[in-house]
Image (tube, rainbow, N blue to C red):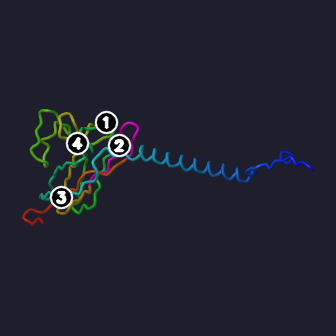
Amino acid sequence: MTHVDADASPGITPPQPSRRFRRRWLLAAAASLLVAAALALGLGLRWLYSPHDLVPRGAYTVIMNRPAVVTVYSPGMVDPSSEAPITVDVRSVTPRVATNTADATITALICHRNGTTTPTGSDDLSMCTWTKPFKPGVLTLDGDLPGTDSVIFKVTSRHAGRVTIDGVHVSYRRGLRHGSQDTGPTFVLKAARSGSSQK
């Protein structure tokens, strides 16, 4: 009788992954890493270049009826999105002029307040300790508290007509973040000839 030893049979080697399979796996892993890095970079750039420190464009309108060839002042409503004032390096302030049939000149001013001023209305400069044409620089934006700044539109019409400003475009830096943002209300000036109706 012949004895057969099971251990004497050659062992079966488990299949090994082919080089092609390994290459595909490595390519898939590299592609995933590239996609993740691109997403992280995109989110980082969005954070850097899309600040939202100001209130967004408002859905309200400030309407002023005034005689033609008169200068009026209106707040630009460049306010912080938080309740506290913010200090930012403002690079540009550009009124977004939609219509200007009054051929008006429009200037952005900086209004600075201290504790000795009391606002008596939005169509005068009583709230301002001083005003000056806007120039790039560091501002503490709020406009209601002593020691803070606000943006004001100075609008002088040359004849009867209508001026519509759809808020203001502000470019600014705050810390590492810098970019631009539309903010403020819609401002409408109806400049009419003396004795004409204003609607």
Residue 175 belongs to the span the image colors magenta: yes
When the figure is inspected, residue 160 is found, relative to residue 110, above or below; the finding is: below
Kindly identify which residue carries mark 1. 138
Task: Give the residue at the far right of this rendering.
Answer: 1
At numbered mark 4, what does the secondary structure look like: helix, strand or loop?
A: strand
Disc 2: CA contacts within 10 A as few (<14), some (14-19) or many (>=20)? many
Image location of residue 12, percent across then percent down: 80, 50
Q: Nearer the viewer, residue 176 or 109?
A: 176
**Mark 3 or mark 4: which comes first in sequence?**
4
Disc 4: CA contacts within 10 A as few (<14), some (14-19) or many (>=20)? many
At numbered mark 1, what does the secondary structure look like: helix, strand or loop?
A: strand
Nearer the observer: mark 3 or 4; the answer is 4
Query: Which residues lie in the magenta part?
Result: 167-179
Kindly identify which residue carries mark 2. 172
Q: Nearer the viewer, residue 165 or 134?
A: 165
Measured Cα–Cα span from mark 1 to mark 4: 12 Å
**Mark 4 or mark 2: which comes first in sequence?**
4
Kindly identify which residue carries mark 4. 150
Q: What kind of residue is marked 3?
A: Leu
Compared across the picture, whether 88 is left or right of 44 comes to: left
Instruction: Give yes or no for contact between labels 1 and 2 (Cβ–Cβ under 8 Å).
Output: no
Measured Cα–Cα span from mark 3 to mark 2: 27 Å
Q: What kind of residue is marked 4?
A: Ser
Kindly identify which residue carries mark 3. 189
